[in-house]
Amino acid sequence: MKQKKRSFLFDRMLGKLCVKMRLVGYDAALNPEGESGRFLLNAAKEGRCAVTRARNMGDRPGPKPVILISDDVNEQIVELFAATGDTPGFEPFTRCLECNALLIEEPEEAVKGEVPPHVEKSFHRFHRCPSCRRIYWEGSHFQAMSKEIKEIAAKLKRR
Ligand SMILES: [Zn+2]
């Protein structure tokens, strides 16, 4: 059976990592502003794995968070999977980077006029966020991302 993918709650200093985890297809939420005192509680309430770089966070009552050391985003992803022991299940471009919602595939006709003409001409697969309506396509960014994912996977194997 396919393992259910873990979902995460990141503390506010890990905003970049949070977006990157959405980019590779993980349910990743950022702790709301002004709620740092409730960080672990929020994670527990939503059944999310809490992730922080604040060492003292581990001393608080509640489920233990994953505490990362690196300040490099890709290194942090490696650390995160090493800490949870999960096999990474990367599914790029399945979630909105802005709001974490699951994207829906859109036929080319449906995005006509909403994307720049050169994009309309060069790309044929589109996804839309049902929440903020943003449209995604597999441009050069996608290729760069695929390369990065391979590098992360290779680093994990070497650990
Ligand atoms: Zn969105």
Image: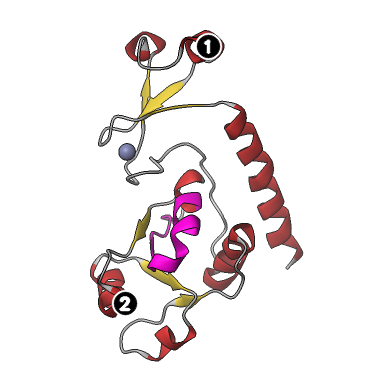
Q: What is the crowding at mark 1: few (fewer than 14 residues within 10 Å), some, or many (at least 20)?
A: few
In 3D space, how far apart are the residues under numbered discs 2 and 1 (Cα atoms)? 46 Å
**Which label's residue is closer to the chain start, 2 or 1?**
2
Helix, strand or loop under label 1: helix
Q: Looking at the rendering, which quadrant does residue 98 occupy? A: top left
Q: Can see residue 1?
A: no
Point out residue 113 in the picture as x, y percentages from the top left corner: 35, 10
Residue at the limit of the structure toward the right, as seen here = 158
Which quadrant holds the C terminus?
bottom right
Point out residue 15 in the picture as x, y percentages from the top left corner: 44, 59
Q: Can see residue 53?
A: yes
Helix, strand or loop under label 2: helix
Foreground residue among 81 and 30: 30
At a point 32% along the width and 33% down the height, the residue shown is 129
Which amino acid, mark 2?
Leu
**Residue ID for mark 2:** 40
Q: Looking at the rendering, which quadrant does residue 114 occupy? A: top left
Foreground residue among 62 and 54: 54
Residues in magenta, as a range: 4-20
Which amino acid, mark 1?
His
**Residue ID for mark 1:** 118
At a point 55% along the width and 67% down the height, the residue shown is 80
Q: Is residue 9 left or right of residue 89?
A: left
At a point 36% along the width and 8% down the height, the residue shown is 109
Point out residue 110 in the picture as x, y percentages from the top left corner: 33, 13
Foreground residue among 55 and 6: 55
Specify the quarter for ligand 1: top left
